[in-house]
Image: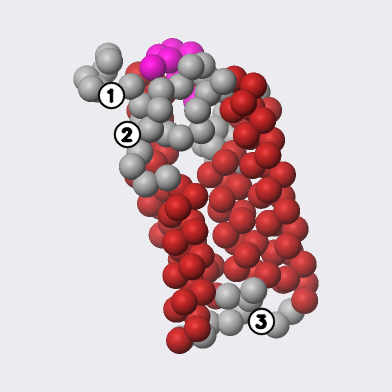
Amino acid sequence: MACGRSEDHADVILPPPVIHIVSIGLGGAINHYFPVSLPHWVILQWVGAMLALSAIAITLWGMREFHASRNPVAPIRPVNRLMVSGPYRFTRNPLYLSLILLQLGVALFFLNGWMVLLLAPVVVFVRYYVVAREEAYLLCRFGTDYQAYQNRVRRWI
């Protein structure tokens, strides 16, 4: 493969859904022993439910685009074409954005402060460990087409 890469994929070992699931589970476990509850406001739980439902909708939309483009979802397989339609018109990372919204939604629904606190390091980790690798791979794979896409569409929102 060109660009000094030996493999034709983004070289992401730990998938972001696993990272977020571990973070949510860890937040639940820590909260069991050292509770950090959010205010017991029903509105927070409603907002959490709406965020989680929005995350599911974005995920389904993004997965539909993966299927339509015949690209693999797993970042350890080569992509066939650059995805620029559907939610990818608004954000370069709609599935990762949906995971952030899902974790925040679950945290608010269960009023779990730990899940909220753990979200920040997870986002930083995903940004620098996953997104940076994917961006480097896509730049290598699609060159100026990906550069133009980067200039047109924001990384997150």
Q: Could you tell me residue 12's position as x and y percent?
A: 35, 38
Q: Which residue is mark 2?
A: 11
Q: Could you tell me residue 65's position as x and y percent?
A: 64, 27
Out of 112 and 146, give the one closest to the viewer.
112
The numbered mark at residue 7 is 1
Q: Which of the two marks, 3 or 1, is nearer to us in this view?
A: 1
* Dot 3 crowding, Cα within 10 Å, few <14, some 14–19, many 20+: few
Q: Which residue is mark 3?
A: 39
The amino acid at mark 3 is Pro
Quarter of the rendering occupied by the C terminus: top right
Mark 3 → mark 1, Cα distance in angstroms: 48 Å
Please say whether residue 123 is visible from this viewpoint: no
Q: Which of the two marks, 3 or 2, is nearer to us in this view?
A: 2
Give the SS element for disc 3.
loop
* Dot 2 crowding, Cα within 10 Å, few <14, some 14–19, many 20+: some
The amino acid at mark 1 is Glu
